[in-house]
Structure formats: C-alpha cells, structure tokens
Amino acid sequence: MDRDIFLFRPLKGRYIWLAPMVYASALVLFVGPLLSRIDLFSYTVGLLFVFLSFSIAVFFLFVETIVLLRILLFKGLKNTSFHLSSIFFALFVFITVLTQLLPVLDKPMIHNVSTNTQPPPSFVKAIPIRSLLNANTTNYRFNPENVELQKQAYSGLTPYVSKRSGEDLFIEAQRILESLGMEIISSDLDSLRLEAVATSFWFGFKDDVLVQIREYEDASLAEIRSVSRVGVSDLGANASRIYRILEELKKIDA
C-alpha cells in the first residue's frame, strides 16, 4: 500500500478515492433518510444508504488502523501520516450510527406495543388511513409471540391509574401527546378516546398512538397503545414512547 495514501496534504496514487468516499459517506448518512422522509424512495433504500455510509466509515477506519500499526512497527516510514480530516468524518459517521444501534440491539422484533394486551384497545380513525397506505396490520396477535416478547422486554408497561375523573385525564393526555409533538387525528371526549400520529425525526417513520381512558367508581385508567405503520421491528420506539407518556401522566398526579 502506498505510503502517501493518507497524507494530510493532497492525496496521490491509486487510493486517492478513499478520502472523497469518506466525505460522501457523511453526506449519504443524512441524505438517505431525508429523501426517504420526503417519499422520494422507500425507507428500505434509506436504510441501505445508512448501511453503506457506515460500511465505508468502518473500512476507512480499519485501513487507518493498519497505517498506524505500520508507523509503530516500522518507524522508518517517515512519509506516512494520517489524513486527519477524513478520519474525523469517518469517526463522525461511525459514532452517529453506533450510538443509534447500541441501545436497541436487545429489543424484540415487534412493532405493536400496548399497556393492555388482553385485549389491547382498538384503533378507529387510524384503520382506514393505514389501509390506504397498505400499512402493517393493527391486529396485536398477528404475531403469536407478540405478547410474550413484549412482556419479556417491557415488563413495566402497564395501564396508568389516576384518581382524576375520566374527562380530566383525557384532557391531560391530549395535552401530553401534543407536547410530545404528536398530531392528534381523533379526539372523542364521549368515548374518552385519543388517536394521534408520531413521526420520527430521522426517517420520518409514522406510528399510530392510541390513548383509551376508562372510568371506574373511584379512579380512571389510561390504556396506551403504539403501532408502527411499516417495518418488522420498531427498535424499541413504540415502547419508549409509551414509557414517556406514562412518565408525563405520573407528573400530573405527583
């Protein structure tokens, strides 16, 4: 491998394409999800862009590690140095993707999560919308293992119980959903049902969220459900969203 490949000064030789590829990988990391978000192509293509960007960064860092070993083992290679700006971009891509992946590696392959699984509250407004988009089914037991996988991964997901009236809890729940940036698509005070759409920041993935309030003699109960429109696994996004809503509900009664 040429000694001048990774010089900070202008590159020469047959590996001159490596540095520009690293710069391009940083651009692709954001362009792929962005174009997927505006529906220029499917989210699977956007994910492929991210994978390609990450692969280029890993390859470049691997090669630079080899160069470092050569410097340490062969101190006479005085003309060999690092292309620092390329390393910075490669590390940026590597760390960005890795920090997104590491927290979700142990998450189950499910995308339909509910605080009540027997049976989960049912969507109404979202059903025709999802049908037009050919989205995932809202049938909670479409995956026979859904209940067990959810219990194993998210044992703390249970309905929220409050001393407030059903109407008060409904109003607070709607305020919370809106404060978390969700779009309310149905607000039915009579049935104490809220339906909303949550959109992810990076790819623009849309998940349907349902809050069903049930009134009892001395308390009210909030059942929460979140279902992804696309994909097999939600990487923990739906459960994380429900946990956040539960935390906000607890604050109002604190």
Image (cartoon, grey):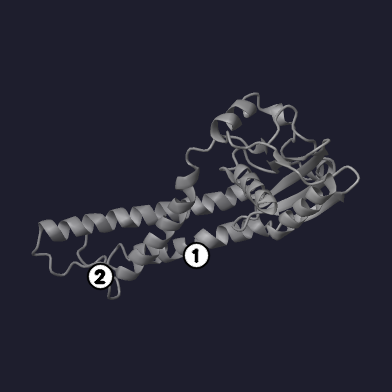
Q: Nearer the viewer, residue 19 or 207?
A: 207
* Residue 157 placement (x, y as % from top left): 63, 37
- Residue located 78% across and 35% down the image: 121
Q: Is residue 75 above or below residue 109?
A: below
Query: Does dot 2 land on a helix, a strand or a loop?
Result: loop
Q: Amino acid at mark 2?
A: Leu
Q: Nearer the viewer, residue 202 or 159?
A: 159
Q: Amino acid at mark 1?
A: Leu
* Residue 78 placement (x, y as % from top left): 13, 69
Residue that lies at the very extreme toward the right in this rendered image? 190
**How far is mark 1 from mark 2, CA to CA?**
22 Å
- Residue located 70% across and 30% down the image: 117
Question: On residue 7, which mark appears?
Answer: 2
**Which comes sooner in the sequence, label 1 or label 2?**
2
* Residue 42 placement (x, y as % from top left): 65, 50
> What residue does disc 1 label?
27
Q: In the figure, residue 95 lies in which quadrant?
A: bottom left
- Residue located 63% across and 54% down the image: 200
